[in-house]
Image (cartoon, grey):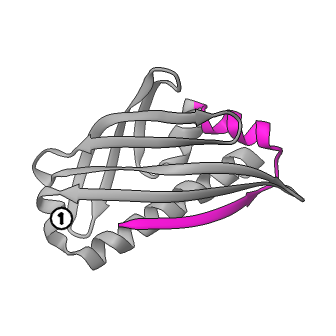
Amino acid sequence: MELTGTRLIAADRETVWTALNNPEVLKASIPGCEELTGSAEDGFEAVVVQKVGPVKAKFKGQVHLSDVNAPESYRISGEGKGGAAGFAKGGADVSLAEVEGGTELSYAVDAKVGGKIAQLGSRLIDGFAKKMADAFFENFKDQVEGNS
């Protein structure tokens, strides 16, 4: 499944780039994130609790940054295991462009799920993934603009 979108953030590109690499900002932006440790250089360890339809799971996994082209773009990718619930993995290509009024953040997300969660059906999974991506980028925008 693939999702794309943009957000206009009322901040300069350097500020947005710094926030994209800040574990505290990322933790506050990821819906259901209970823990995020590590660094942009070495990767992050994350614990995220999510409910997808009737299945609630605690995912533990790693998040890595690659194809870093500061302060313009990078790929953020991760994989989490949720025990009996299954797994989720995916990533997002994120790019920043200076525009009038701030910075335009563009993203293209790809995600895959397996295990019990995958049995819920693609409509439910796709809707959940879109909701999660929208929530992450809206939370991120609020964090950068100081609206949190």
Residue designated by label 1: 118
In the displayed structure, would residue 117 be above or below residue 43?
Answer: below
In the displayed structure, would residue 135 be above or below residue 146?
Answer: below
In the displayed structure, would residue 39 be above or below residue 84?
Answer: above
Give the residue drawn at x 51%, y 39%. Answer: 27
In the displayed structure, would residue 44 be above or below residue 9?
Answer: above
- Left or right: where does residue 50 sit relative to residue 35? left
Classify residue 7 by image quadrant.
bottom right
Give the residue drawn at x 25%, y 45%. Answer: 58
What is the x, y in percent for residue 8? 74, 60
Q: Seen from this angle, which residue lies furthest right?
A: 100
- Left or right: where does residue 25 sit relative to residue 117? right
Q: Quadrant of the N terminus?
A: bottom left
What is the x, y in percent for residue 35? 41, 33
Give the residue drawn at x 77%, y 38%. Answer: 15
For the residue pair 95 and 15, the one nearer the viewer reads as 95
Give the residue drawn at x 46%, y 66%. Answer: 3
Q: Seen from this angle, which residue lies furthest bottom?
A: 123
Report whether residue 148 is seen.
no
For the residue pair 6 and 10, the one nearer the viewer reads as 6
Question: Three-letter amino acid code at disc 1?
Answer: Ala
Magenta residues (range): 1-22
**In magenta stretch: residue 11:** yes
Classify residue 18 by image quadrant.
top right
- Left or right: where does residue 54 sit relative to residue 26? left
What is the x, y in percent for residue 107? 57, 57
